[in-house]
Amino acid sequence: MKKIFKNAILSASILLFSSSLFADGLTLKSDDMFGQITNNQVFNGFGCTGKNISPQLSWLNAPKSTKSFAITIYDPDAPTGSGWWHWLVFNISADTNKLVSNASSLMKLPHASIESLTDFGSSSFGGACPPKGDKAHAYVTTVYALDVKKLDLDKNSNPALVGYMINSHTIEKSSIITYYKR
């Protein structure tokens, strides 16, 4: 009887442990971004001739304690010494789970959300545009589940400050990495 009881406890423990390994966490998806960036998400300027369309994004399995979301697109390979911020959106309400394609240009971002300055100097999406002949750059698109309803920042906030505030309030995050070379 003792052996059966021990085996039952062991089996239950293994089941609980293995189910936690496969528990669904925050997951970011996109119909527009996968593998290589297409001309839709390439900047129109700086020598690039893309359509500069912000990507469609959706996310699921946010932590129950999420009070808001933020989205960033960042190029760690930009030859600046500090990377390049392509898009920063924050104060996205906790009941939101998607952004439509071209939301930045079409002004279809969720109510009360804020797009702050990018390294292009504008408060809107700026697509990929690595230097001609440079290696393929990685573009990291990330959704952050935050523990605050609102970051006390505005559309003129410096991207590094926005990144700092997002990271200091992150509960969980999920990223998609895409690449582009010209």
Image (tube, grey):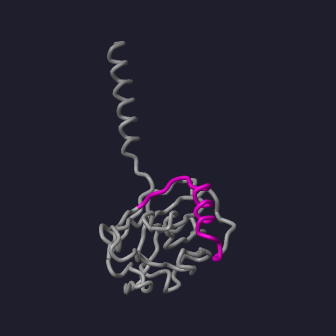
* The C terminus, quarter of image: bottom left
Q: Which of the 4 quarters of the picture holds residue 14?
A: top left
For the point 37% across and 84% down, which residue is it?
50
**Residue 25 percent coordinates (x, y):** 43, 52
Q: Seen from this angle, which residue lies furthest top?
A: 2
**Residue 21 percent coordinates (x, y):** 38, 41
Check residue 11 for magenta coloring. Answer: no
Left or right: residue 102 compared with residue 180:
right
Above or below residue 162? Residue 45 is below
Q: Seen from this angle, which residue lies furthest left?
A: 35
The residue nearer to you, when weighing 137 against 1, is 137
Q: Which of the 4 quarters of the picture holds residue 151?
A: bottom right
The residue nearer to you, when weighing 33 against 135, is 135
Q: Seen from this angle, which residue lies furthest right?
A: 152
Above or below residue 113? Residue 148 is above
For the point 54% across and 71% down, which residue is it?
88
Count of marks, rendered view: 0
Q: Which of the 4 quarters of the picture holds residue 91?
A: bottom right
**Residue 45 percent coordinates (x, y):** 44, 86
Check residue 167 for magenta coloring. Answer: yes
Stretch of the chain drawn in magenta: 155-175
For the point 51% across and 53% down, which residue is it?
172
The residue nearer to you, when weighing 109 against 43, is 43
Left or right: residue 6 compared with residue 152:
left
For the point 65% across and 76% down, which residue is it?
156
**Residue 34 percent coordinates (x, y):** 32, 68
* The N terminus, quarter of image: top left
Above or below residue 168? Residue 150 is below
